[in-house]
Each structure stands twice: as C-alpha cells, then as structure tokens.
Amino acid sequence: MEFTGMIIDDEKIVREGICDLIDWNLEGYRLIPGGKDGREGLAGILQYKPDLVLIDIKMPGLSGLEVIQKAKEQGFEGHFVILTGYSEFEYAKTAISMGVEGYLLKPIEEEELLQFVRQIHKKLEEEACLKSFHSQNEGKARKDLLRRIVLKEDSLENLSRDMELYQLPLDGSCFCVAVCRDMDEAGEKDGKIFRQKLNTLIEGDNACVGFFSVMGEAVLVEKGIPYQQWKKRLEKRNKRLAGYHGSGFRIAIGNNVRSWQELFCSYESASYLLEQSFIFDQEDILTMDLICSLEESREAVSVEYLEMLIEVGEEEGIRRAMGMFRDYCAWQMLKSAEIKMMLVQELFQLQMRLGKKYVSDVLSNENFQPQIRKVMEAEDMGGLLACFEKILMELSREVGTGGAGNIIRRVYYYMEKNYDKDLKLETIARNFNYNSAYLGKLFRKEMGESFNNSLDIIRITNARRLLQETNLKVYQISEKVGYGSIDYFYIKFKKYVGISPKEYRKNLKSEESED
C-alpha cells in the first residue's frame, strides 16, 4: 500500500539528503513537493494532504510548530515527524505534546529514519483498513437508516438521532419515493445485473439521495424537485438504460411530501401504483397523474353487449369493447387476478348463452378450455385483451357461418339493440355483407314479417314500455324509439296498438286508479 511523504526544511542540502538517505519507493512512499520555508510548507500540506510530513522546527516565515498548529486547525490529519538539532530539544518536546509522531535529531541517521518511516507506514495501513471498514459499514448503516425511515420501522426519536449520527441529507421541504422493478426476468433473478442497471439509472442524479432494496425491488428517495420533474428525468434515463441493457425498469413514483417524516406516505402511493402495472402495461413510468387522468363513469362491458357484438359480427365493435374494458379495469383499479376471473366468467356465460342458440365447435368444452388457460396465463393487460379479443372474433365468425337462420337472428338482435338509430335494411345488409334484396327475402321467410314491419313492432313495443314506466313527453319517447317525426310516430302507434300514445297512457292511469 503506497502513501505520500513530504519534506519541509529551509536547507536544500537537508531536503536532498533525506530524499537520498533511504529508498522511499521501497518503503511504500511517494515523495511530493515540500517547501523551503514555513509558509510554503503549510501551503503544500493543505494542497497535497500528504500522509507523512518531516518538518524542521526553525524556518523563515512560520516555525515548524506554527505550521503544525495551523495545519491541524484546518483539518489536516496526516502524521508529523519533527527535524531538530540538540539545541532545539525543548521545542521537540512541545511538538510531541501537540500530537506529532516523534522527532529526528540532525544529522539524521538512516536506521533512525527507517524506524520512524516503517512505524508510521504500519499505522497508515491500519488507519486505511479501519477507514475502509467504517466507510463500508457506514454506507450499510445509512442505507438501513433510509429503509427504516421510508418503511416507518422505528420511532421518530431514534430516526432523528441516527440521521444526525450518519449525517443523512434529508433536510428540505420536497421529497418523494420511487419504486423500481426490473422488466426483464433475468435482471430480477441476477442481483449483479440488477445493481448494474440501477447504478446506470441513478448515476449522477443529484436529486436521488439514496436507495435500498425490498423484495427484489429498488426503492429510491428523491429530494428537492417535484415528482413531475423527476419523472421526466427518470423517463429519459430509463430509455437510455433500455438501450444499454435491452430492457429498463418499470418505475412507480409516489406523490410529493413535505418532510422526511412523511416519506412513508410517498412510498405507499408508489407501491400501490406498481401493483397496478398489469393494467398500465403500456406505461414504463407510473405516477398519480395516470389515476387522475382517468374519466369517471366508466361502466363494465356487459355479457349481453358482447353477445350482441358476436352475433351481429361487429368486429370493430369488439375491438372498441376491449378498450372500454381496459378503461373500466383501470378506473376500478382491479388486480390481475380479478381481471382474469372476470373475463373467464364472461366467457363461460357467453358459452352458455350462445350454446343455446348455435351449434359451434368453438363453443365446445374441448376447444373452450384451452382458451380459458390462455386467458389465465396472460402476463400483461395487452396480452390478456388480445387473447380475449381473439376468442370473441372466432366466436363471431363461427356464429356468422351458421346458415340463414343464424344470420337473421343476428340481424334481429342488432335491431333490438339499435332500434333508436336510423336503421335501414340497405345499411344493415352492407354491414353483414349481403345484398339488401336477398337479405329482405331471408328476413321475411324466417320472421314472417318484413324488415320494416319488424322494426316498427320493436319500436312500438319499447314506446309502450316508456309510456308506462316514465314521465317522458310523447315527443321525447318518439325520438327515443327512433322516429324523427312525431306525426309518423302517432300513425305507427295507432296502427299497432289501436289508439294514440296519449290515450294509451290515459288508459294506463285509469287502470292504476281502479286498482
């Protein structure tokens, strides 16, 4: 182990003599420029911070004792050996009381110099080992302290005491916590890869005051900037990290807190966000902004709605339903197991409902069970929805090839669900890839009524329901069931019911009063 040495003496011949007296390199020292007087020597000590200083007592400018005193006052921790003549022995004793290692009488003997040099070298080695040990253990202690603070594992009194002891820099009024999970399974299992990636992520980031690990995830503590700003920084670094290693981290950043005592709150919000990473699989950086940006009134996608989409063969509608389902799960903050079970239940219900109407190989248990397994094995939301969508598409195509009866049932179901819209046989024929005249003939043959008559019956049936169950005005009901003209609504209503809508509602009220 090599250390540095410095010789300070106002006599050049003494400096050169000490340099040549022993083999300094062999003894484990590298000599650095000293000084020819006290002031120059003090400047050299403060600049180069040598491990060993051999210094004369009587020198111009500052005496050796003054140099020692001033150097120690400014925090110098190196070792001093005094160079003195017999007449200066009392000075030497004073220097020893100031903490120097000893003194060498001039003219200096080789053996005596070697004794001091080797003795101090041994001390320096012991100090270096002790310093390294303390440094390593202090780093571990600081990391453990940070963990206790963030996870709230100790009293505030103990934490405050240890923060002062280890000088943990948590003063300020803006803090937040980020939790990082490796997106590559190899990184999760190999601690060395994980540490390399983490070091790449936080290297040179002065906002990050420390980190520790919990259950294979890295917890970072940030100070001094809002989490939105830290998000941008981590996002940029994470992309660069993915370029270096092939994959980065999924990072959840908690909300800002005002003091280190509240870091636990930020950690909890970050952990909660990371639990939602299955839903937000399209995002590498998760913040509370994702939650706040979700719109309210998200509704679940019903089995009835999916059944209708399957039966009418509306593939674009099925794709839109997947987006609606993702939004609903995000708004409800559902966990992966809950989402998978919900989809499995819907698939079983679809199998049962469609199985009563159609004969299909896709609906058989033999073919259905493997599809269920694929749903349960999906690793992220994107893969899960892709698998679910594929199953629905296969069902739709299978049901759509079930003969004329199936086609007309699909058309009729579509009419029941969309009677409030401006439905035309020509439009529906295009949707189902049929000639409108041919579809009209098929419809009359299967249903016993024309398309227009069937649509009128559906609309008037729903109008009667609204007249009975709501207080809507007649013109409002006319619009809700798909009639743009109230006069036309009156004509159709009287045709199928025998009386006008107002008379129908009046009769209903009379019947209620008699009861």
Image (spheres, rainbow, N blue to C red):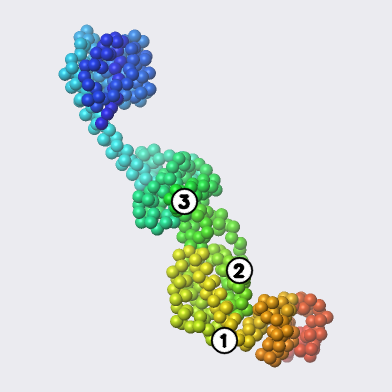
Give how far across and how far down residue 231 sits, in percent.
52, 48
Residue lying at 50% horizontally and 55% vertically, measured from the top left: 284
| Type of the residue with mark 3 | Ala
Residue lying at 46% horizontally and 42% vertically, measured from the top left: 205
The residue lying toward the viewer, choosing from 14 and 427, is 427
Q: Residues within 10 Å of mark 2 (few under 14, many from 20)?
A: few
Which residue in the protein does label 3 denote?
Answer: 242
Left/right of residue 485 with respect to residue 75 in the rendered view: right
Distance (Cα) linking label 3 and label 2: 31 Å
Task: Please tell me in which quadrant of the rendered image residue 298 appears.
Answer: bottom right
Secondary structure under badge 1?
loop
User: Counting residues from the N terminus, which is met first, the one under dot 3 or under dot 2?
Assistant: 3
| Type of the residue with mark 2 | Arg
**Residue contact between numbered discs 1 and 3, judged by CB atoms under 8 Å:** no
Q: Can you say whether 220 is above or below 411 in the image?
A: above
Question: What is the residue that sits farthest to the top in this orientation?
Answer: 87
Residue lying at 39% horizontally and 47% vertically, measured from the top left: 196
User: Counting residues from the N terminus, which is met first, the one under dot 1 or under dot 3?
Assistant: 3
User: Counting residues from the N terminus, which is met first, the one under dot 2 or under dot 1?
Assistant: 2
Which residue in the protein does label 1 denote?
Answer: 357
Secondary structure under badge 2?
helix
Secondary structure under badge 3?
helix
Left/right of residue 117 with respect to residue 231 in the rendered view: left
Left/right of residue 86 with respect to residue 172 in the rendered view: left
Which residue in the protein does label 2 denote?
Answer: 320
